[in-house]
Amino acid sequence: MRVLRAEAVRRNDLGLDPSKPTILLASDSPCKHTGLGRSTRMIWSPIYETGKFNIVQLAWWHVNVKEEVPWTLLATKRNAQGIIDPADKYGNVSLNRVLSEVQPSIVWTSGDPWMVLPMTQRRNLVSGPIIFYSQCDGGPLDITQRNGNTLGWEEAVRGADVVVPCAPWGHDLLKDSFPNCSLRPYIPFGVDTSVFKPVDVAERQKIKASVFKLDPRARVFMSVSRNQQRKYLAANMQALYFLRRGRFNICAECGAYNVWRRDYSRRKDLGPEPFCKFCGHKKLRPGRPQTDLFYYMHAPLDDAMDDSYRLIPLLRQFGLIDSSTNMNAVFWNNELRSTSGEMDDKLSTYYAGTDAFALPTTGEGFCLPMLESMACGTPVVAPAHSSHPFFVSGVGRLVPISYYWCEPPTNYWRGLVSVDAWAQNIDEATKSTEETRQACRQRALSFDWKHIWPKWLKLIEESLRDGKSANIWQEPIKGV
């Protein structure tokens, strides 16, 4: 694998075969363990092996790790200290030179709109079509300006010859907001089921003892995510707190869990509900403290975005890592960093060694961790919102949305679950049968990358044949 500096690349250094069309990829580095990085690697590695194309990638956020790919990577600009130049993190500075030297027959770019904007804004510098692989995680897709700036949806979609969503939900959002765009049928994210695979009960117990340092009989649920506001990791902490303390009652009529009332500002529990919040029945029996339940939080503690939780203080609010309460119930990987992520085989071990995957995220587009979890036979608990039902319906636990809130500055309507229902589904999911785990694996097999990448090959060949769109959207659309 060759890694060249994007801002200094020369065509002669690329070793391109003039008899083949050249595809320029623009996305997270395939060596980076992010959803975009993984999907780029898994889609384009088999396409490269067909021998039909030259492939070069403008690799955002490239890091040198053990992963390798056979095509040339063009790393975005870094300063003298080796830190990625913020001005060029998505190719804003180096892209003109890259396009001039690579001279791509087609461009494939994957990411959020503000990531792909540098490419779609340079449509006039690309002789062939631009394909935008879109991962909508919220909606509606607000296209109005704020202080002269936009979130980029209109510009990103306007500059693409082909727009491909990764789930039916994203397809509907794009169609609703941009009815004139060059929208194609969705192509979902996949999962490498040869790496992400289940283990038997004995091996799962061994992982709990040797990797997690727990009693082999413990029940463990996990989440995999960045530390962002929309991931709503606080709900996992709430659920774990009430379950381990036994501060919930179970309705004798409908079976629903009702967690205690709590004054979160003063960190004080106020006692049980007098009647069921779901059916109104007054006969409630006390829940048993679930002291065998633990949470592995696979989230980088170094995430320091504007909307990141301060995870350690948040855990302390519930006494979940305070040794004086004997409730060291949450653990994490201190070596995990937002800039690199985790190797696939190691992450697979974590998934396979746990009893459930629970991510209370308020909106997702491609749901890769859920697919990886199911591939390892681990049941998924997810809100019944955004793309989650498409990927996990039939085998996962979809928790109804309790209410919606409007997220600034995107104006996306995010779906939040109740802590009562979330706690109950985590508790029950961690007691799932082996038959349930097998069903999860079967569901994930239908999303194996071997079924996904041929769809991309077909679309690439069609796009090369059709060329740039003659029906590119020109006139502005009124905002939603």
Image (cartoon, rainbow, N blue to C red):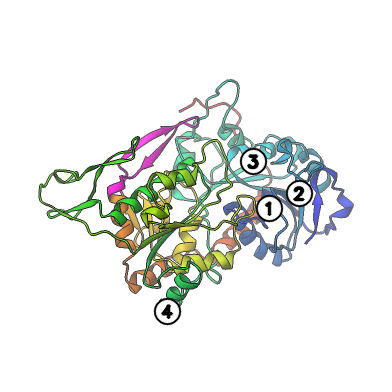
Q: Which of 153 and 280 is in front in this view?
A: 280
Q: What residue type is labelled 1?
A: Ser
Viewer-side label of 1, 4: 4
Query: Residue most toward the right?
Result: 12
Asked if residue 386 can be seen in this view, the reply is: no
Q: Nearer the viewer, residue 105 or 39?
A: 39
Q: Where is residue 299 in the image (x, y as percent from the top left)?
A: 52, 52
Viewer-side label of 1, 3: 1
Q: Is residue 150 above or below residue 162?
A: above
Q: Could you classify mark 1 by the number of other residues whose Cα lies within 10 Å: few (under 14), some (14-19), or many (20 or more)?
A: many
Spatial CA span between label 2 and label 3: 16 Å
According to the picture, the residue beneath numbered tag 4 turns out to be 202
Asked if disc 1 and disc 2 are in contact, CB closer than 8 Å, the reply is: yes
According to the picture, the residue beneath numbered tag 1 turns out to be 29
**Badge 3 or badge 4: first in the primary sequence:** 3
Q: Which amino acid does label 3 sit on?
A: Val
Spatial CA span between label 2 and label 4: 44 Å
According to the picture, the residue beneath numbered tag 3 turns out to be 116
Spatial CA span between label 1 and label 2: 8 Å
Q: Is residue 265 above or below residue 378?
A: above
According to the picture, the residue beneath numbered tag 2 turns out to be 75
Q: Which amino acid does label 2 sit on?
A: Ala
Spatial CA span between label 1 and label 4: 37 Å
The dot on residue 472 is none
